[in-house]
Amino acid sequence: MHAFVEYMHTQAVSHGAELFVIDSAGHLLIATRKTSAPGYERPSPDVIQRAAAGQMVVFAKAREHLVYALAKLDHISDTYLLVVRPT
């Protein structure tokens, strides 16, 4: 698991994003954190349901100047990857 978290951190830094692994209830399981990054906000149940159905769900919060993408992680039971980055 440590190698996976290190890989997530490397990807977050190289892409200027924040990565979160959550479960279907929106509970935070793993997070990368940069000092200037926004905090975690639980996606709505509708967004999680769409991701559970196999969609890559992309949405923006213009007021916060952030774009989000949520996808189900097929090889790890009940997990989703949430990517957050500035627009």
Image (tube, rainbow, N blue to C red):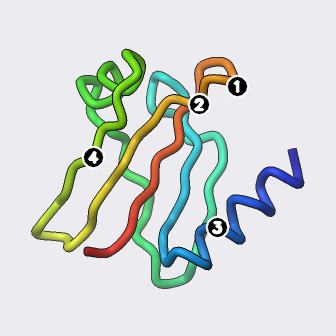
Can you identify the residue that label 3 sits on?
11
Mark 3 / mark 1, whichever is N-terminal:
3
Q: Find disc 1 in the rendering and name its residue.
A: 76
- Quadrant of res 34: bottom right
| Structural crowding at the residue carrying mark 1, measured as other residues with C-alpha within 10 Å and reported as few (<14), some (14–19) or many (≥20) | few
**Amino acid on which disc 4 is placed:** Val
Determine which of the numbered discs, if any, sits on residue 73 in the image: 2
Tag 1's secondary structure? loop
Residue 58: mark in rendering: 4
Residue 67 picture location, percent across and down: 28, 61
In the image, residue 37 lies at what x, y percent?
46, 75
Left or right: residue 59 compared with residue 54: left
Tag 1 near tag 2, CB within 8 Å: yes
Q: How many residues crowd around disc 4 within 10 Å: few (fewer than 14), some, or many (20 or more)?
A: some
Q: Residue 28 carries which label?
A: none
Query: Outermost residue, bottom direction?
Result: 36
Q: Where is residue 62 in the image (x, y as percent from the top left)?
A: 12, 66
Secondary structure type for disc 4: strand
